[in-house]
């Protein structure tokens, strides 16, 4: 037992842990623990920093130069190797702050709990301070293992004063933030977060009731058309039956009944608007709901309370606003359904992320975080939530001033119906729903899906990261010929070349692996693999130094090449300083990729080429795609390796999902998301300005009692005019 204790103590010392006494006390009963000591050590090993080895540029002095970047844990053939195995020297990053622990008793057992929200403070004697930090985070502890406690003396029974103090402490409320102080012994239970729905479940949710919503929207439109006819027939000299043309009460009654029917069909929209008003978060639906109620009340009382001549009520305007609002909601749900269907089309799709530092980049990972992004409120909701509350309040106050302020309170409902009709913009829900539906349908056909407004509201950036597979996907790169030099066999040359190319992770890997497979060769695990800025790789295979790269790289490395060998795109292989083989590579550019690159440049998105294939250079891309890449970025090899890593990004920065390979869906999602962001904000601000100006205009006309100027016909023209920019801007989103 003492020997095992010593061995485990040495393992802890290798991990750099200073305070290990509390863990070593329970080694005798560690076999009874819920988790073994090896699992705890593995957890601490995972927390230690990675080692990165970056060497200086080489000088051609006859020896093998130092690489520009040597990967610390590059995978090759499914086996990972570390800097220790590669024989490299690494710079150690100092470990982060340690995490203290606490103990608590429960039925004869003692739990050692690591407090994740507190840092360890060192005392002069090497102990641990029990004082909490300045700003505790309130996170709960994490159970490490169970340990049997030592025998403790029985505690004396508390006296009456101590019992009273305990009762007083029990009656005190817990902290508001649910936090836990350093000295507490109770682990606070926390409510687990709501699990995220799968894309297919989200698509089914958005599809549920979509047909019914479409039918009710069409019915509201069909009801609104005759209402508009009854409203404008006299202004446009349209025919009307004599019983309706000669009787205002018949027309008013017809408008009242038709609007009641339209309101019943759109009751869900009206109820949501009123509920938002009760929650003090009014928006576009709130303005429409208030306009519907005000116009209904005005139509029901206008023949009794007021005499406004032959002018009808504002029922047609409210019903038309209800139609546009329901239509926008339908388009939004259809767009979200198409996006979730695209996400569910692939078992392991690519996720497009967007950060301010790197711009757009994609990773092949799980779909977690995408469905949550589709539920993010869009910019139009926030804009209308800021503008419409004061507009609606102003409409109510202006109605009081125009009616009761002039000593004629009977005109209040008429003034309120006019001002709220002007405030109920037709572009409310269409500002986001109309462009989203068109863009989502286009992206769905190209193999992409936008993560709702979360895919548009990422930090503004003007760059997009492109890798080997984006420029030349599978099937566009092939090996056109092989030539072997020296005494090496064809199988050895192809095996060496495929092994080092596969370890690089470049776009040539698939073509070389297929070549080895057809020849019956094997992939070997390279040692000391390194990248060079000059366009090549180096590694050790079976004790031999192997170089792979372009002809210029071979010349810089001192490898002699045959005269007259002219190859624009090829892979040169050298073993121990001698040329062993040459592979001619054929790149077949795709016309769709060329169009996508041109679209990115027109949209002012700068391509950043994070490529690992040394043949892909700006000159080669210009020759293949016939485009000007002078404004594109071609970073150093170290930066290219960072940008082309395959790790997952942050869930908060998900912009889109891709279920197909290639640059076309990737570019469409990036360009479309940027355009949608601009379109929604522009439409929402224009519609908000129209609502505010409409309320001011209606207030002035009702204040002077200009019945012939503030007619429903004039307000209808005004609202339709302010909705035209929304349709124009929405059509612009898909024109790229």
Image (cartoon, rainbow, N blue to C red):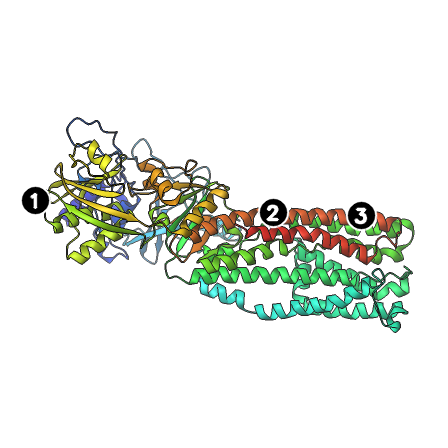
User: Which of marks 3 and 1 precedes in the sequence?
Assistant: 1
Local packing at callout 1 (Cα closer than 10 Å; few below 14, some 14-19, many 20+) is: few
Q: Nearer the viewer, residue 385 or 256?
A: 256
Mark 1 secondary-structure assignment = loop
User: Which of marks 3 and 2 precedes in the sequence?
Assistant: 2
Q: How far is the residue under mark 1 from the one under mark 3?
A: 92 Å
Mark 2 secondary-structure assignment = helix
Residue at image coords 67%, 47% = 686
Q: Which mark is residue 102?
A: none
Local packing at callout 3 (Cα closer than 10 Å; few below 14, some 14-19, many 20+) is: some
Q: Which residue is mark 2?
A: 681
Among the 4 quarters of the image, the one containing residue 299 = bottom right
Q: Is residue 140 left or right of residue 291?
A: left
Q: Nearer the viewer, residue 661 or 25?
A: 661
Among the 4 quarters of the image, the one containing residue 428 = bottom right
Residue farthest toward the front in the current orientation of the protein: 564
Residue 29 visible in the displayed image: no
Mark 3 secondary-structure assignment = helix
């Amino acid at each position: 037992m003492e020997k095992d204790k010593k061995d485990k103590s040495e393992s802890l010392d290798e991990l750099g842990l200073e305070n290990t006494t509390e863990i070593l006390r329970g080694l005798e009963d560690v076999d009874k623990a819920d988790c073994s000591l090896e699992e705890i050590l593995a957890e601490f090993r995972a927390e230690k920093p990675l080692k990165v080895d970056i060497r200086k540029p080489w000088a051609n002095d006859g020896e093998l130069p130092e690489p520009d970047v040597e990967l610390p844990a590059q995978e090759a053939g499914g086996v990972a190797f570390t800097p220790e195995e590669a024989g490299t020297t690494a710079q150690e990053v100092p470990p982060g702050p340690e995490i203290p622990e606490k103990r608590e008793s429960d039925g004869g057992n003692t739990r050692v709990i690591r407090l994740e929200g507190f840092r360890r403070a060192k005392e002069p004697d090497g102990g641990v301070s029990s004082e909490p930090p300045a700003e505790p985070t309130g996170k709960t502890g994490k159970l490490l293992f169970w340990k049997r406690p030592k025998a403790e003396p029985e505690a004396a029974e508390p006296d009456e004063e101590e019992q009273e103090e305990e009762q007083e402490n029990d009656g005190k409320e817990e902290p508001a933030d649910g936090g836990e102080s350093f000295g507490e012994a109770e682990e606070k239970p926390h409510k687990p977060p709501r699990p995220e729905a799968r894309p297919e479940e989200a698509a089914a949710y958005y599809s549920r009731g979509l047909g019914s919503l479409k039918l009710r929207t069409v019915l509201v439109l069909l009801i609104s058309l005759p209402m508009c006819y009854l409203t404008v027939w006299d202004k446009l000299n349209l025919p009307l039956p004599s019983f309706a043309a000669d009787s205002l009460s018949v027309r008013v009654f017809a408008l009242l009944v038709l609007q009641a029917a339209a309101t019943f069909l759109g009751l869900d929209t009206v109820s949501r608007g009123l509920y938002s008003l009760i929650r003090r978060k009014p928006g576009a639906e709130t303005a429409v709901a208030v306009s519907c109620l005000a116009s209904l009340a005005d139509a029901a009382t206008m023949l009794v309370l007021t005499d406004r001549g032959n002018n009808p009520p504002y029922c047609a305007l409210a019903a038309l606003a209800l139609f546009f609002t329901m239509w926008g909601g339908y388009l939004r749900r259809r767009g979200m359904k198409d996006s979730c269907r695209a996400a569910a089309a692939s078992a392991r799709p690519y996720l497009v992320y967007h950060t301010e530092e790197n711009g757009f980049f994609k990773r092949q990972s799980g779909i977690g975080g995408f469905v949550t992004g589709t539920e993010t409120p869009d910019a139009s909701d926030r804009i209308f939530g800021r503008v419409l509350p004061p507009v609606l309040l102003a409409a109510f106050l202006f109605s009081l001033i125009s009616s009761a302020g002039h000593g004629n309170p009977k005109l209040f409902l008429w003034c309120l119906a006019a001002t709220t009709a002007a405030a109920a913009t037709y572009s409310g829900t269409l500002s986001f729903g109309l462009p989203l539906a068109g863009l989502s349908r286009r992206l769905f056909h190209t193999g992409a899906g936008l993560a709702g407004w979360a895919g548009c509201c990422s930090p503004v950036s003007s760059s997009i990261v492109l890798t080997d597979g984006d420029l030349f996907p599978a099937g566009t790169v092939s090996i056109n010929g092989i030539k072997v030099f020296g005494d090496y066999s064809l199988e050895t040359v192809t095996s060496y070349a495929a092994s080092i190319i596969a370890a690089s992770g470049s776009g040539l890997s698939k073509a070389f692996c297929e070549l080895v497979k057809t020849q019956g060769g094997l992939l070997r695990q390279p040692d000391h693999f390194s990248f060079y800025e000059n366009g090549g790789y180096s590694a050790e295979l079976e004790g031999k130094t192997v170089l792979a790269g372009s002809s210029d790289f071979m010349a810089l490395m001192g490898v002699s090449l045959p005269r007259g060998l002219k190859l624009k795109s090829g892979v040169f292989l050298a073993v121990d300083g001698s040329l062993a083989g040459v592979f001619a590579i054929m790149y077949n550019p795709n016309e769709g990729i060329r169009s996508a690159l041109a679209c990115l440049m027109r949209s002012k998105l700068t391509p950043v080429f994070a490529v690992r294939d040394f043949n892909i250079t700006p000159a080669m891309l210009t020759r293949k795609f016939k485009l000007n890449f002078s404004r594109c970025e071609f970073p150093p090899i170290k930066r290219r390796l960072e940008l082309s890593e395959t790790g997952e990004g942050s869930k908060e920065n998900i912009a889109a999902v891709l279920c197909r390979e290639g640059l076309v869906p990737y570019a469409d999602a990036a360009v479309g998301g940027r355009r949608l962001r601009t379109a929604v904000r522009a439409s929402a601000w224009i519609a908000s300005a129209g609502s505010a100006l409409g309320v001011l205009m209606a207030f002035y006309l009702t204040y002077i009692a200009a019945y012939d100027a503030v007619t429903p016909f004039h307000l209808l023209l005004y609202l339709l005019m302010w909705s035209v920019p929304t349709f124009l801007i929405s059509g612009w989103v898909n024109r790229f």
